[in-house]
Amino acid sequence: MTECIEAKTTTKVFGYHQVRLKGKRWRAHRWAWELINGPIPEGMVIDHMCSNRACVAIDHLRVVTQRENIMAGLHNIDNRSHCNQGHPFEGNIMVRKNGRRECAECNRARSRANYAKQKAGA
Ligand SMILES: [Zn+2]
Ligand SMILES: [Zn+2]
């Protein structure tokens, strides 16, 4: 694979560069894709094959369905279909603001535990 080309923009939101164009804010890699390949079909997202979200190198990008992107992201971290606690990942994924995907069931359990701790401490 060729080297990554990182967008040089001033704003970076959750690891994605943003560009301003026609009064809209775009993620730089989406914009780069549409510039060359035309509009991204409804329900499709851009996937970074290089896992570098700041990258706008067109040959590192591909169009996938939202679901494929989530599953691909999971495979980047983890090849398993279940989390450590044995919850199935399929249909049970939450994406954090930083782009990390994790088990929604475990996350709910964690926030319940945190809430109980806070309540006990108050
Ligand atoms: Zn890249
Ligand atoms: Zn879990």
Image (cartoon, rainbow, N blue to C red):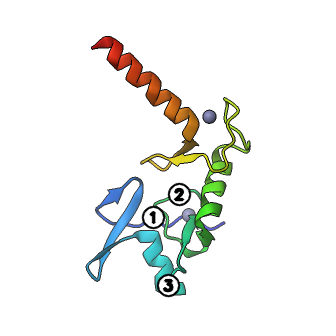
- Screen quadrant of the C terminus: top left
In the image, is 101 to the left or to the right of 76? Answer: left
Taking depth in this image into account, of 94 and 26 the one nearest to the observer is 94
- Kindly report which numbered mark, 1 or 2, lies closer to the viewer in this rendering: 2
Q: Distance between the residues labelled 3 and 1?
A: 21 Å
Circle 1: residue type:
Glu
Q: Are discs 2 and 3 less than 8 Å apart at CB? A: no
Q: Mark 1 points at which residue?
A: 6
Q: Please give the name of the residue rendered at 53% of the width and 57% of the height, measured from the top-left corner.
A: 52
Q: Are discs 3 and 1 less than 8 Å apart at CB? A: no
Estimate how packed mark 3 is, as few (under 14), some (14 to 19) or many (20 or more) residues with alpha carbons within 10 Å.
few
Q: Distance between the residues labelled 1 and 2?
A: 9 Å
The residue at the far top in this view is: 121
The answer to which of marks 1 and 2 sits earlier in the sequence is: 1
Which quarter of the rendered image does ligand 2 occupy? Answer: top right
Q: Please give the name of the residue rendered at 42% of the width and 54% of the height, measured from the top-left corner.
A: 15
Q: Quadrant of residue 114?
A: top left
Q: Does the residue labelled 2 lie within 8 Å of ligand 1?
A: yes
Q: Are discs 1 and 2 less than 8 Å apart at CB? A: yes
Position of 1 relative to 42 (above/below): above
Estimate how packed mark 1 is, as few (under 14), some (14 to 19) or many (20 or more) residues with alpha carbons within 10 Å.
some
Q: Position of residue 67 (x, y in %)?
A: 62, 61
Position of 91 relative to 29 (above/below): above
Q: Please give the name of the residue rendered at 66% of the width and 66% of the height, measured from the top-left corner.
A: 1
Position of 102 relative to 1 (above/below): above
Q: Mark 2 points at which residue?
A: 52
Q: Which mark is residue 39?
A: 3
Q: Does the residue labelled 3 lie within 8 Å of ligand 1?
A: no
